[in-house]
Every structure is written in structure tokens, then in C-alpha cells.
Image (tube, grey):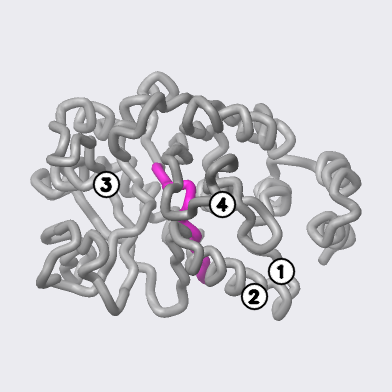
Amino acid sequence: MKGIILAGGSGTRLYPSTLTLCKQLLPIYDKPMIYYPLSVLMLAQIQEVLIISTPKDIVKFQELFQDGSWLGMDISYCIQEKPEGLAQGLILASDFVKNDDIALILGDNIFYGQGFTDILKTAKEDAKNHYASIFSYHVKDPERFGVAEISKNGEVLSIEEKPHQPKSNYAVTGLYFYDNQAIDIAKNIKPSQRGELEITDVNIEYLKLKKLKSQILGRGFAWVDTGTHDSLIEASSFVQTIELRQGYKIACLEEIAFRNGWIDEAKLLKRAKLLEKSGYGNYLQKILQGF
């Protein structure tokens, strides 16, 4: 399975903060926003990742991650000339994906919760069996989101985009697992009324095939879409509270790579020395000490 992070867009809801810096590089507490979606793919044991962004911003991601070898990964980059829908990301990634299954995540989504790795593993296995998986989260105001109606065994019965009368309280988050046919599906859908290739239309095609499942993120999970100034503060406060209370870091890429066996102690020590003047670097030192 290969991973795709969509990190394009203009971030207009965050102006003036994003006039010169793209949204996905804004800090969420102690690390760039894009660390969080990348950590999700790493928890799913995905080592090959494509970052899709704008012509202006792609170089900044290249500077941040280089080729990914310091994480034991292979990170590639692709330019999206203009935003024409989330499903366009699947088309742009077709040469990168080749014949593999796909995990697609939005660059501004943050997930946190115990047992998340097991949920990702299940979705990954389902993709091998030609199922697509969305990840649903219970919200009090579902009319603001795409909404999934879900059966007791986890199959999706319907999906509606911002319905006036929602059939459930489960919002569809910005994380999707697909088998390889998602590429062809994306190539054959038509632009919506707003002129974009909608990821919802890709999911609806799987729904028609009775091949769409939902992984429900329950009460012990947090999901934040960091698209507004208020949600940025909310996400940063959440991460700060967890990290200061527990002593563990959320979305520490080097730690995940080390525990996955992708990098050794020498590479972890090199990163710790590079970042030694920060609390993040000190945390990497503690990992080396068996923390």
C-alpha cells in the first residue's frame, strides 16, 4: 500500500496567516501540521508516500522531508497546478501508485486515539480484499459535514454531503483507504457543480458496488480538521494537554520510524542532536535512553 497526502489549496480561511506560508506547515503545538497526517500513514506501516501540493509550496515540503530516508521512508512529491477536487489527487498519483492499494489523507486532519493502529490495519486488509474504507466520527452537528449512514456490521448504506436532515451523526473524515481501482474510478467521474472531482463521488461508486466500509472512531478518539483559526488553537491545546500530562509526543515521526524498525539508534541520535535545543530533540534523547 502506498500513501498520498493532499497538501494543496490556498488556505483562504486562515488568511492572513497563510498568505506566504501554506496551511499544512503551520505549527500545531510543537510540530508542523503535516507531521500529523504523515504519522497516520506511518502507523499503517506505509513507507512510500507522495505529497501533493501547489507549485509555490512543494519546495517547502521537499526542504522539510527531503527523500524521507532519515525516516527510513521513500517520500516523493507532485505538483497540483490548480485545485480541482480531492479525487484529482488519485489521478495525479497514478504513476506513483502503479498497481498498489492506496491510503489517502488530507494534510490538515489530525487523528488521535488508543487502538488506532489496529483500525488502520483492518482497513488495510480490507483494501486487499477490494473494499474501500472511510473513517467516521460522531459529531453533534452532522449537517456541517459529509454524513455516512452505517449498518451494524460497518457497511455504509448511504453518503450525503452536508444534508439538511442527516441520517446519522457520523461525519466522514479526511482519511480513505482504497484498492487500486480507485484510480480508474477517479478518472471516470464527472466534475461536480462547483467544477471539482469530488472524493464523495469516488466513495459512492464503491457504495454502488457494495464495497464501502466504515471504520468508526469511537468515544476515545479525537479528530480535528484544522481549517480555521479556532480549530488550530483547539488542536494545539489538545496536543499540548496530552503531551504535558502523559510525557509522550503525538506524531513524533522519528519515534514511529524507530519503533517500526525503519531507522536504527544511530539515525535517531543524529536527529536528536540536530534538534537538541528543543523539547522535541530532548524527547528523542529520552527514547534512546529507553523511555
The amino acid marked with disc number 4 is Ser
Magenta residues, as a range? 104-114
Q: Secondary structure at mark 3?
A: strand
Which quadrant holds the N terminus?
top left
Q: Quick check: 110 above or below 184? A: below
Q: What residue would you read off at disc 3?
A: 132
Q: Pointer 3: residues within 10 angstroms few (<14), some, or many (20+)?
A: many
**Residue 91 percent location from the top left of the image:** 31, 26
| First of labels 2, 3 by sequence position | 3
**Of the two numbered discs 4 and 1 in the rendering, the one whose residue sits closer to the viewer:** 4
Position of 103 compared to 155: left or right?
right
Q: Residues within 10 Å of mark 4 (few under 14, many from 20)?
A: some
In this rendering, the label closer to the viewer, 4 or 2 = 4
The Cα–Cα distance between marks 2 and 3, rounded to whole angstroms, is 31 Å
Q: Secondary structure at mark 1?
A: loop
Q: Residue furthest top?
A: 95
Q: Quadrant of residue 36?
A: bottom right
Q: Is residue 102 left or right of residue 287?
A: left
Task: Say which quarter of the image contains residue 102.
Answer: top left
Which label sits on residue 248?
1
Q: Residue at x 70, y 77 (%)?
A: 246
Comparing labels 3 and 1, the label whose residue is closer to the camera: 1
Q: Position of residue 202 (x, y in %)?
A: 20, 41
